[in-house]
Amino acid sequence: MSSKRKKRGSEHLQRVIDMCKSIEERSLDPFNVDVDDVIAVIQKYFPEWELPEELCLDAEAIHHLASIIKLQGDWVKHRSTSLYTDPFLLEEKIRRLSKEELATLFLETWRPIIELEQISLHSLAEATKYWQSLLPLSERWLKTGSLETEIGATSREELIKLRILAEKPFLEELEVFWEELKHRVGGKEKSLYWNFIGADTYPETVKRAYMTSFLVTYGYATLELHPLEEEIFIKPFEKQRSMLGKKRMVSIPVSISFEEWTNWKGGKQN
Amino acid sequence: MKRKAYYTRKIKRATHLLFYRRHRKPGVKGWELKRKLGSDYPKVLKILDGHLEKLDLQVKTVFEGEKPTGEPTLEQLDKARFYITLKGGLVPKETKMMGWRIDDIAGLATAISYIIAKKGKAPREEVEELLRNKLPGWRVDINMNNYIRSGYLAEDENKQLYLDWRTRAEIDQKALIDLLLSKEKVLDGSS
């Protein structure tokens, strides 16, 4: 194939692509494109393409032509529905109706949504409580100033007390927690997430949720989500599994608010 | 008696859920109602609808995708969105109370019906040109932005307009087109 012919061919394909794009983007009539003609053009040049960029251009032309065929299909589908009206006819009708007539017609088919936006006594009380406990800005800003402290040494016991160091190595603690999960699940395959992490106090519940997140991340257990029922189950593995590289890792945010803990506790007591 | 009390409680709960906006958009998803009211929520909504009818209100169901032809399945209901809307139509005087001018309503009617006729998608430029026929130019842009902000219309990066969630929830599109066509017939007959 001469380079002149190649150049003409690629220009031809580029024009096809541009035409298809403008129809897609500006919602022009898709039937303006004669699909058979375009296919003939693509076919004509196809055996001559050798370079990757030439083949890419060919593929792009096919891709846009397929979009046009889809638009033509949609057009036929829409025409067969009861909502079809010739846009030119409708435009003419809209132009001939007065504003008042148009508005009156519209009101017959308009059923506005009813909604309320009103503060409740409960939220007002909560907001007042918050406002009362809020320190003035001048006092809050004072607190952010640096405090001078004496330099001294600290002991391992003190660090454990401050929860900077753990009593047991973390992994050891995690494995104990894993054993507890396996024991809790027993003969069943899984346990409700909240039943496992829920504890008598809120801080303990948060700690258990924190540990559970590591059980899942490190492949000791997995979470099973039932979105419609809004239920989460935790399923322990018999052996630790390495998740990395096998599956796409997904983060699952689980809210452990005080309110949810109270609800869970209330439900448990009932 | 127990059963009656059960449904009374559920209806109250459903009323609170449906009337008060809890998310960015009004309305409640079916699965959310199922979680809060129990699996018999379609029955609760039916009873509530009966009560609301006396007040010219209704529980409106907007399905995901096309409206099912027969009785909707539970799965379709769970995915649907439920709203409280007016049951009957409004008269032009009432729209003033809602803060709508006759120009705004006529412009919205024009934009929506034109987009429907163009298979649910039309360039903003074309719709604005049609509106300019009856509205002052400076108002057209303000009105279009209002329709988009309220959720009647949506606009993409290519300046194409679509019908948005509020149109699907509030407007009987087929009736609107039928009314426009039949109104024209009367005009044709009289001319």
Image (spheres, coloured by chain):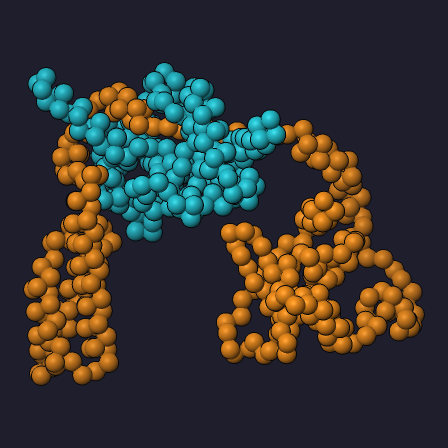
Chain colours: A orange, B cyan
Q: Quadrant of the N terminus of chain A?
A: bottom left
Coordinates of residue A109 in the picture (x, y in percent):
31, 27
Asked if one can make out residue A95 in the rendered structure from this viewpoint, the answer is no
Coordinates of residue B150 in the picture (x, y in percent):
41, 36
Q: Quadrant of residue A20?
A: bottom left
- In this rendered view, identify the residue nearer to me: A82 or A35: A82
Viewed as shown, does residue B82 lie left or right of A144?
A: left
Q: Quadrant of residue A157?
A: bottom right
Q: Quadrant of residue A234?
A: bottom right
| B141, above or below A177, in the image | above
Viewed as shown, does residue A257 lie left or right of B26?
A: right
Coordinates of residue A141 in the picture (x, y in percent):
77, 47
| A263, above or below A175, in the image | above
The residue at 50%/74% (across/down) is A247
The residue at 58%/31% (across/down) is B3
| B69, above or below A115, in the image | below
The residue at 48%/23% (across/down) is B51
- In this rendered view, identify the residue nearer to me: B184 or A217: A217
